[in-house]
Image: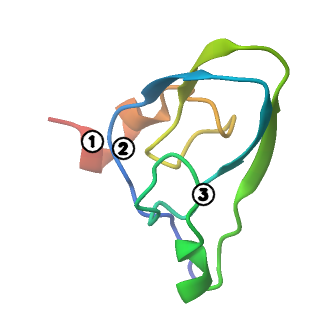
Amino acid sequence: MSKQEPKIADCKPIFLDLEPGEYWYCRCGRSQNQPFCDSSHREEGIFSPLKFEVDRARRLKLCRCKHTGTPPYCDRSHLELDECKE
């Protein structure tokens, strides 16, 4: 049985200025509110969102390819994905 892969929401990260608080990162790639969860994962029931906290106001680079090894942060994994190569 093969591992279920997330949908690639975008082949580049998004830079966001976030305030302190709790956020839910989409791991399935199907959310219409990328990079945040909108509960679209419930349709397939495979992925669940990742809760992360921001301790102070800051600019963050968040992954949208959903293949990062450091979710929710971009680690440039999109550069290795065939779907994202030009």
| Residue type, numbered disc 3 | Arg
Dot placed on the residue nearer the N-terminal end, 2 or 3: 3
Q: Position of residue 70 (x, y in %)?
A: 69, 34
Q: Which residue is mark 3?
A: 27
| Residue type, numbered disc 2 | Leu
Secondary structure under the numbered disc 3 in the rendered image: loop
Dot placed on the residue nearer the N-terminal end, 1 or 3: 3
Image point (67%, 40%), residue name: 71
| Residue type, numbered disc 1 | Cys
**Depth order, front residue of 19/69:** 19
Q: Which residue is mark 1?
A: 84
Image point (78%, 25%), residue name: 20
* Figure check: 75 above or below 47: above
Question: Do the residues bearing badges 2 and 1 touch, measured as CB atoms within 8 Å?
Answer: yes
Q: CA distance from mark 1 to mark 3?
A: 18 Å
**Depth order, front residue of 2/10:** 10
Front label number (1 vs 3):
3
Question: Do the residues bearing badges 1 and 3 touch, measured as CB atoms within 8 Å?
Answer: no
Residue 81: mark: 2
Secondary structure under the numbered disc 2 in the rendered image: loop
Neighbor class of circle 2 (other Cα within 10 Å; few <14, some 14-19, many 20+) is few
Q: CA distance from mark 2 to mark 3?
A: 16 Å
Task: Locate residue 17: give its quadrant.
Answer: top right
